[in-house]
Amino acid sequence: MYHYDDLDKRQVQERADQFRDQVKRRLSGELSEENFLPLRLRNGLYMQKLAYMLRIAIPYGLLSSEQVRMLALIARTHDKGYGHFTTRQNIQFNWPQLEEVPDILDKLASVEMHAIQTSGNCIRNTTTDHLAGVANDELEDPRPYCEIIRQWSTLHPEFDWLPRKFKIAVSGADNDRAAVYFHDIGLRLVKNSEGKIGFQVLVGGGLGRTPVVGKEIKPFLEKRHLLSYLEAILRIYNLQGRRDNAYKARIKILVNALGIDEFRQQVDAEWEQIKQNGLELFETNIDRFKGFFQPPDYQAGDAHDSTLDAALAADKKFSIWYKHNTDDHKQPGYRIVYISLKPPTEPAGDATDVQMDVIADLADEYSFGEIQTTHNQNLVLKDIKLSDIYAVWKVLLKHNLATANIGTLTDMICCPGGTYCDLANATSIDVGLQINEKFDSLDYLYDLGDISIKISGCMNACGHHHIADIGILGVEKGGKDFYQITLGGSPGLDAAIGKRLGPAVAKERVPDIIGIIIDAYVEQRAEGECFNEFYSRTGIDLFKERVYANN
Amino acid sequence: MQIIKDQHIIDNEWQHCDETTELPSGKVTVPCSRWMEQREALISRGNIGLRLKATDSVDAIKDELVHFGCIAIEFAKFNDGRGFTQARLLRERYGYNGEIRAIGVFLQDQLYYMTRCGFNAFEFSAEQNLEKALIAFSAYTVTSQPDVFKNQEGIGPWR
């Protein structure tokens, strides 16, 4: 993984020092809350319902064991013993004291981490495929480019006060696991007709209250122009994006208003002027970054391991977990292991300090000391030797980290919702837990196959409900929590925004309605047909009739 | 009244005039629209600076820059980042060498960023301890991308 050089270290420490001064000025009253607000937001510090919330950047979701141990220490020392992994591959702490935040930032800086630009109307943490570097279907590892974008976007002098927040995702595989069509800019590494690898550039995608599928602005961008092209897009957006209405300020609104062709023309005209302005990436620069993401020292291995096979045959619980929570690795003799942060009785994405320490130890012992976060709010140990998988599972099981539900209905994305979030219209966590309670049979979940439920507590859509097979959106009706159900969304290359099923329903009815939807699917699906395929074939009316028949 | 210019506290010499007021003697800035209307008269008067709002196009005045002793970019709100791009274009693309001054509502914590975009003068409208604001210029010693100063020696193409 990337390691800070002296300059990175200095920059991050200087940022921490600057924030310490800002907090001091706030506490002394020299800085008003109004003026402090944008400064703390740029350091990831939100005011939530009950306390401050600190969001820490995990660049493209990659963590070292040392960093995870530091997060555990912060959870223990400055929080109530847990952290929450987010859909943007970051981590949030829900209970820090303002006075202690400078100390937290110092601790983070000591392990090459920070909370810079995790909030505010600036360029946010760049996200990527959680299987980057190990996926079978990868054209090229996207992480060197993520790191290049991280550096370029960090404390960018011109783009710190954009009309609205700005999110970039990069994918390097045939399949899209980074939701590139739903980011302000989506970048896909692709091969052109001459066999050269560059970027397909998508722009203007996003969720929130106006979900939009991103549009292609450039089918093929040479790698060397990556940063100048991004800078051109940002500059047009900074000058022309709407600033009169926060709900219409994202780049998707500008792109739609101008039309993609006009927007492209303006970006290209700007780009022509800055192409050679010191942002060009040369082969030597790219190679330097690639050097940080070279494959680890894999041991030659076979596609099968006799000790693993024996364990799978002897231990049914293990074999079920293995089937659902591990994945093919590009390197023979290894598998990708998912750590589910979705046990039935805990909020999705939460991990305790003890769990984090355990995961760090596992990474050190078995997975080259690295841990990956996913936008589905799980963790991944990317490089587990076949002969080690059983041992890893035993440890995960002991610490409630081995719920065998990856990709199933209970592998839900769920935002913090009204339990914590000041923006929420309704709660999310308890809805997720109720659904878990209803669908408590793993065998039944396996029979349902791949199906996604995503829950957002408000239309800001942090829980990605628009791009779920079954989306659940919290709304408020007469002071009570109600939920709008959508069906048929998809985050991948078949990008689709879910359709509304019908009127919102009361909280206590949500699990039953999910049940009705699932029953309709189970009763009428063709052999081997997954929910998404079934929905594509039948459409929404069938579900509407079933759900609202008796109302 | 005092301002910060080139990281020193100095007395302000520029007066900001609106569309119609009779111009006092000395150095004055006028809004873009007044410049367009009274261009010839203002050129012969001399001692003229231009005032840009966030919505004004820098491209539209790019051939006029030689006439301005100062270009004041006005921040109606500190979180309106258009002025950052305006300053950068003036400095970097159109080679304006004179004073680029931030006026209106902005924060001392923004000075470092503004400097990198080409601002070299700062006139606070809100109450501000200028001595304390000077600290902001040395908040960082590392940059990660090109800016109006561009070549950071020995640190690769963009850093």
Image (cartoon, coloured by chain):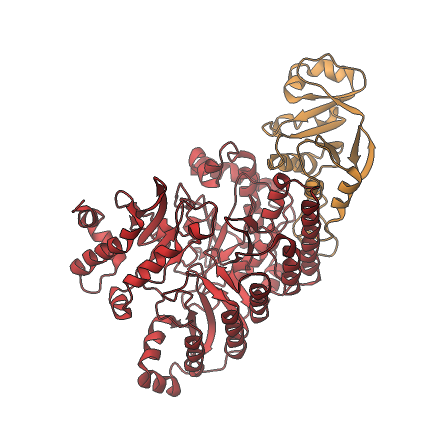
* Residue drawn at the location 47% of the way across and 49% of the way down: A421
Position of residue A42 in the picture relative to residue A372 (left or right): right
Position of residue B130 in the picture relative to residue A115 (left or right): right
- Tell which of A442 and A131 is nearer to you: A442
- In terms of image quadrants, where is residue A35? top right
* Residue drawn at the location 34% of the way across and 64% of the way down: A407
Q: Position of residue A338 (x, y in %)?
A: 42, 69
- Tell which of A99 and B104 is nearer to you: A99
Figure quadrant of the C terminus of chain B: bottom right
- Tell which of A207 and B41 is nearer to you: A207
Q: Which chain is red?
A: A
- Tell which of A536 and A453 is nearer to you: A453
* Residue drawn at the location 59% of the way across and 41% of the way down: A161
Q: Which chain is orange?
A: B
How many marks are shown on the rendered structure?
0
Q: Position of residue B55 (x, y in %)?
A: 58, 28
Q: Position of residue A159 (x, y in %)?
A: 60, 43
Q: Is residue A1 visible?
A: no
Figure quadrant of the N terminus of chain B: top right
Q: Is residue A376 visible?
A: yes
Position of residue A528 in the picture relative to residue A458 (left or right): left
Q: Is residue A372 above or below residue A120?
A: below
Q: Position of residue A397 (x, y in %)?
A: 41, 76
Q: Is residue A468 above or below residue B120?
A: below
